[in-house]
Image (cartoon, rainbow, N blue to C red):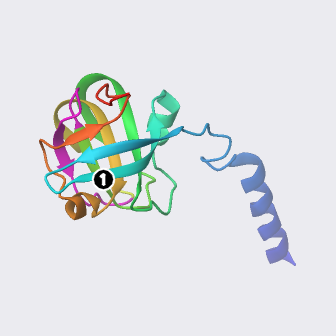
Amino acid sequence: MRVFHFVVLCFLFLIFFAGPAPSQDAPLARIEQVVVETAVGSTVFLTEIADTDELRSRGLMFRHRLPDDRAMLFDCKETRPVMMWMKNTHIALDMVFIRPGGLVAKVAENTVPMSKTIIDSGEPVAYVLEIAAGTARRIGLKPGDRVIHALIGNANG
């Protein structure tokens, strides 16, 4: 009987003191198309736009899956050196660091899930596109390629 009471107390503690899961009650990002142009061709991603402090700080944390045709585009709001990490991110990602105007500055492939190791942009950038690990290699994405979206200011129409 003591074990049962202990389990119930632990459960109640978690409910009342641990708070809601990080993804609950969080605002949803709008989803828009982002086009990545490489020497191999163009690839379209359905992309969550992280353009607020809250959306940028949450990013893709606590997710357990990212389909190959999905992405998240971070608007850094200014051109500056950017440092990312994978804390609380359960899926491996490719991080694409993007200069103003949309040219790719750096691609960090196959980032390690849950790692606190800093992933540095290597130079001042304005945007970061996160895609499923292995996607950059699959589509031939390299520095100098182009990312197109209205947020970047290089989309037609």
Horizontal and vertical percent position of residue 44? 36, 50
Circle 1: element type: strand
Q: Nearer the viewer, residue 112 or 8?
A: 112
Amino acid type indicated by mark 1: Thr
On-image quarter of the N terminus: bottom right
Q: Nearer the viewer, residue 120 or 14?
A: 120
Please say if 137 is above or below 80.
below
Question: Along the horizontal axis of the image, is 137 left or right of 127?
Answer: left
Horizontal and vertical percent position of residue 97? 24, 40
Horizontal and vertical percent position of residue 126? 27, 28
Horizontal and vertical percent position of residue 42? 26, 51
On-image quarter of the C terminus: top left
Q: Which residue is mark 1?
A: 43
Q: Which residues are magenta?
A: 98-113
Residue 25 in sight = yes
Please report the residue visible at 39 percent of the width from the left and 62 percent of the height from the top.
68
Q: Nearer the viewer, residue 156 or 96?
A: 156
Q: What is the number of callouts on the image?
A: 1
Residue 118 in sight = no
Residue 125 is one of the magenta-drawn residues: no
Q: Quadrant of residue 90?
A: bottom left
Predominant secondary structure, magenta span: loop
* Mark 1: few/some/many CA within 10 Å (<14, 14-19, 20+): some
Residue 110 is one of the magenta-drawn residues: yes
Q: Nearer the viewer, residue 142 or 76?
A: 142
